[in-house]
Amino acid sequence: MAVVLASTENMSYEDWLEHRKLGIGGSDASVVCGINKYKSPVELWLDKTDQLPPQEAGEAAYWGTQLESIVRAEFTRRTGIEVTKPDVILQSEEHPFMLANLDGVCEVPDVGACIFEAKTASAYKAGEWEDTIPDEYQLQIQHYMAVTGYAGAYIAVLIGGNTFRWKFVERDEELISMLIELESAFWNHVQDCTPPPLDGSDAAAKFLSERFPTSKPTSHITLPDTAADLLAQYDEACAELEAVTERKQKAENLLKEMLGDNEVGTTAGRVITWKSVAQERLDSKTLKAEHPALCKKYTNKTSYRRFTIKAVS
């Protein structure tokens, strides 16, 4: 069961962000589980421990909020199921670190109270909604069911501004148990002010690049003994990647040989293309030699940190 943590009626966006730091919300669930493409668990930990500056909502989040009421109304029009919008932040009684800010609730015969979740998606992501829902949203609504105790959830999505779909999702006790375990462990990191371990996600790599953007020239440290195990893992992964890359390239070469000078080939329900592509590229070397001032004027300097491993000579 859930209790009301705070009313969101007339709550400012800044206050809403502060309340989110008091626990783990539904949109945080995929981050905690390490499947979010855009945010790492460490970045979420920094946010919850108030070590990151407030971030403004992006365009996608802004329009998602603006269109929420439209998606809710269209769902009712198509299904006949009335949805009400609770203007509160809910908190799990049993697990107080679990919070829920619901888009809506509805009553369904033979099921009872259910969650309603409204989404918008780009047309490029239409395939993710064909027969199921994206994993991050599955985790989000199961998180909400864990907080509320509800037995089901409706999720509706407006895709590309002109395609509307909805799906009913039942409560998954096994998934909820996993979520509670992972979120509990993450919240322990928040309370202890100890960061969670980094993973192999692109979000984690992005976090490190932003956290440590520049190196200190000539600085040198001796790494701890645990670095040797990581080096062994790195070398093993490189060897596996090299073998996989070579196998992939061999298959590609043989397919190209079969195509010859043909542009398109089909087999086993797949279409293979090997097209001629013309590109125009700036000859920067010649430009620099013949027009150095002009080249300097339109050249942007960028920097990044290159990661390498080599034997000590």
Image (cartoon, grey):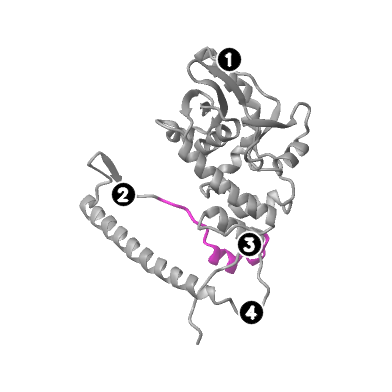
Residue projecting furthest to the bottom: 313
- N-terminal-most mark, 2 or 3: 2
The three-letter code of the residue at mark 3 reads Thr
Residue type pointed to by label 2 = Trp
- Give me the disc on residue 302: 3
Cα separation between marks 4 and 2:
48 Å
Instruction: Point out residue 221 in the picture as x, y percentages from the top left corner.
Output: 63, 78
Give the SS element for disc 4.
loop
Which amino acid lies under the numbered mark 4 shown in the image of this protein? His
Residue identified by numbered label 1: 82
Query: Which contiguous range is marked in magenta?
Result: 278-297
Disc 1 or disc 4, which is closer to the eye? 1
Q: Is residue 42 above or below residue 304?
A: above
Which corner quadrant of the image does residue 126 belong to? top left
CA gap, disc 1 and disc 4? 64 Å
Where 141 falls versus 234 (above or below)? above
Q: Residues within 10 Å of mark 1 (few under 14, many from 20)?
A: some
- Residue positioned most to the front: 94
Considering depth in this image, is 186 or 160 the residue closer to the camera? 186
The numbered mark, 2 or 1, whose residue comes first in the sequence reads 1
Q: Which residue is mark 2?
A: 274
Q: Position of residue 289 (x, y in %)?
A: 58, 69
Image position, residue 170 (x, y; %) = 46, 29
User: 109 or 288, which is in the foreground?
Assistant: 109
Cα–Cα gap, marks 2 and 1: 53 Å
Residue 279 within the segment the image draws in magenta: yes
In the image, residue 146 lies at what x, y percent?
56, 35
